[in-house]
């Protein structure tokens, strides 16, 4: 399975795109420089949420 059109468009726009060889594998990425947390789809929502909780201050 090759890269999707979104991955290609982001790469063409100059973004660094990280993917997995298994499209259903979970990948969560925190970009400190721009304070962006992203993941690769609904299969990653639990890990995404757990990582978000570690990044947000508790009040």
Image (tube, helix red, strand yellow):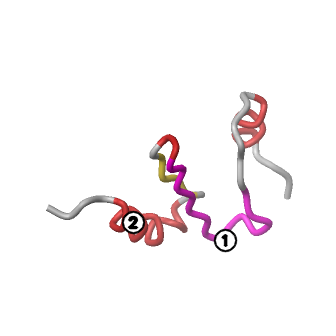
Residue at 71% across, 47% down: 17
**In this view, 2 is above or below 49:** above
The image quadrant where one finds the N terminus is bottom right
Residue farthest to the right, as pictured: 2
| Label 1, label 2: how far apart the Cα atoms are | 16 Å
- In the image shown, does 26 or 43 lie closer to the viewer? 26
Residue at 61% across, 65% down: 27
Q: Which residue is mark 1?
A: 25
Residue at 52% across, 43% down: 33
* Secondary structure type for disc 1: loop
Q: Which residue is mark 2?
A: 49
Q: Callout 2: few (<14), some (14-19), or many (20+) C-alpha neighbours within 10 Å?
A: few
Q: Is residue 11 magenta?
A: no
Sequence-first disc among 1 and 2? 1
| x and y percentages locating residue 13 in the rendered image | 72, 28
Q: Main secondary structure of the magenta part?
A: loop
Q: Is residue 27 left or right of residue 49?
A: right
Residue farthest to the top, as pictured: 13
Q: Is residue 20 left or right of residue 34?
A: right
Bounds of the magenta segment: 19-32
Q: Is residue 50 left or right of residue 34?
A: left
Is label 1 or label 2 in front? 2
* Secondary structure type for disc 2: helix
């Amino acid at each position: 399975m090759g890269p999707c059109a979104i991955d290609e468009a982001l790469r063409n726009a100059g973004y660094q795109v990280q993917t997995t060889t298994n499209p259903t594998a979970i990948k969560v990425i925190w970009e400190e420089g721009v304070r962006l947390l992203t993941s690769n789809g609904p299969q990653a929502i639990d890990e995404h949420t757990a990582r978000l909780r570690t990044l947000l201050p508790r009040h």
